[in-house]
């Protein structure tokens, strides 16, 4: 994997036709970005790429995102995830785990549009920090 300084420099800004991502944090193998609509300065949400694999990350997933309610429904999360997949490929990740609560239908659709493969639905274990807010996660895998 590339060094932290190399990642920060090379992946500080990412863009496609719909969104622009600006790196705001690179800490402890996690890259966090603000999401902007292309050509605008309004933050529409944020996303992050969690690098590596562990039992802890299995339930969180390697990618997280949140779009502000007033900007939902425009596929901004999908565009951001696709950009993060490119970063993961370039730093030699072989696969990523994506997770979602079963009742979050928009995120389920977003994950499925990435081409990720559904693995199973699992209960979040008592020891995991998510347990206090979420008890069940759908687990997807995307091979890079």
Image (tube, rainbow, N blue to C red):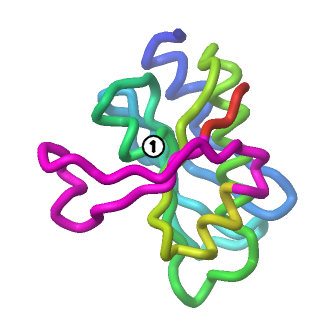
Q: Position of residue 121 (x, y in %)?
A: 47, 53
Q: Confirm whether the magenta stretch covers residue 68.
A: no
Q: What element does badge 1 sit on?
A: loop
Q: Position of residue 43 (x, y in %)?
A: 55, 71
Identified at 14% across, 49% down, the residue is 126
Give the vertical position of 111 relative to 104 (above or below).
above
Quadrant in the rendering for residue 67: bottom right
Quadrant in the rendering for residue 52: top left
Q: Residue furthest left?
A: 127
Q: Which residues are magenta?
A: 112-140
Q: Which residue is mark 1?
A: 61
Identified at 42% across, 56% down, the residue is 137
Q: Nearer the viewer, residue 89 or 61?
A: 61
Q: Is residue 122 left or right of residue 115?
A: left
Quadrant in the rendering for residue 77: bottom right
Q: Confirm whether the magenta stretch covers residue 136.
A: yes
């Amino acid at each position: 994997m590339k060094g932290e300084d190399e990642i920060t420099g090379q992946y500080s800004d990412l863009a496609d036709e719909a969104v622009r991502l600006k790196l705001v944090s690179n800490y402890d193998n996690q890259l966090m970005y603000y999401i902007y609509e292309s050509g605008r300065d309004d933050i529409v949400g944020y996303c992050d790429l969690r690098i590596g694999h562990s039992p802890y990350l299995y339930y969180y997933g390697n990618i997280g995102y949140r779009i502000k309610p007033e900007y939902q429904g425009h596929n901004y999360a999908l565009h951001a995830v696709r950009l993060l997949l490119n970063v993961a490929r370039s730093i030699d990740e072989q696969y990523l785990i994506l997770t979602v609560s079963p009742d979050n239908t928009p995120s389920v659709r977003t994950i499925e549009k990435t081409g990720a493969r559904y693995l199973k639905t699992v209960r979040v274990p008592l020891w995991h920090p998510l347990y206090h807010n979420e008890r069940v996660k759908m687990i997807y895998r995307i091979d890079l």
